[in-house]
Image (tube, rainbow, N blue to C red):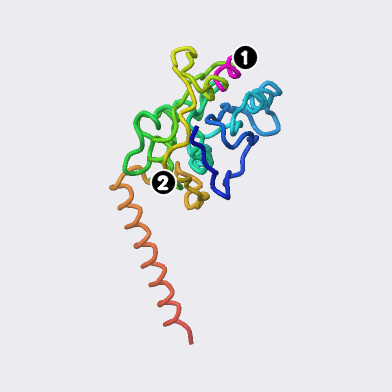
Amino acid sequence: MFKVEPASSYPPEEGRYLRGNDYSPVAVAVILNYDQEKIPPDIENLVRVGLESGAALSGTIQTENIGIEKLICNIVANPNIRYLVIFGPESPGHQTGDALLMLLANGVDERKRIIGARALTPYLFNLPIEYIARFRQQVRIINLLDEGDPDLLRGAVRSCYQEEPTSFQNYTLFDPGAYPEGPLSGQLTWRVTRPQAEPKDEGERQQRERLRNLMARMKQAAEKKREREQP
């Protein structure tokens, strides 16, 4: 079985996850719809179940933008990860699970918006397009949205690292070995922390740029006027 060393910085992004076997082919993302201080024990238990069942990474994911960006950074830094199990009740606000499914199915548009996602702000502005493409090529999603049975999660994770093809629900799973290209290692640049405030199309972008230029000219004119009025 072909396996490789993850990037030296792996996993590059911090988050609510546990690190397990670096050579495992599967990561687990439990959808989180609670504030940090209100995370119920059942959710924390599912994260531990994912790790104890053999996942490389097992944690929670909350948002359809920065949350997904951090997850992608961590996964593409480890080519051994070939599956992502998404588990737990969908977030009615962020629609994070749907955004992940749409990302794998459709990719992103020219503005890095996840095509077909129902979420309000499914933008991956902080990621290089190379990372998004690699994630879509490297990983297959096991969709267990709205499931909460720990035994089901155990079965999904264990099926992913079998040497022989194994039936699990509607999937045929096995460990295909590491993705054939090297790890991508990098952290988010955090250029955009409020994707909802970004312009939605080129027309809005140009309008915003014209407004910035107008305000800059007005500020410059006001400064020159003050200089002329000084004794």
The residue closer to the viewer here, 83 or 86, is 83
Q: Nearer the viewer, mark 2 or mark 1?
A: 1
Residue at disc 1, secondary structure: helix
Give me the disc on residue 125.
none
Mark 1 Cα shell of 10 Å, populated few (<14), some (14-19), many (≥20): few
What residue sits right under mark 1 in the picture?
A: 151
Q: Which residue is at 50% across, 30% downward?
A: 94
In x, y percent, where is residue 103? 40, 32
Mark 2 Cα shell of 10 Å, populated few (<14), some (14-19), many (≥20): some
Q: Which region of the structure is painted magenta?
A: 152-157
Does 123 appear in magenta? no
Q: Which residue is at 32% across, 39% downward?
A: 109
The image shows residue 84, relative to residue 131, as above or below, that is above
Q: Quadrant of residue 149?
A: top right
In x, y percent, where is residue 25? 52, 31
Decide: marks 2, 1 in contact (CB < 8 A)? no
* First reached walking from the N terminus: tag 2 or tag 1: 1
Give me the disc on residue 198.
2
Does 155 appear in magenta? yes
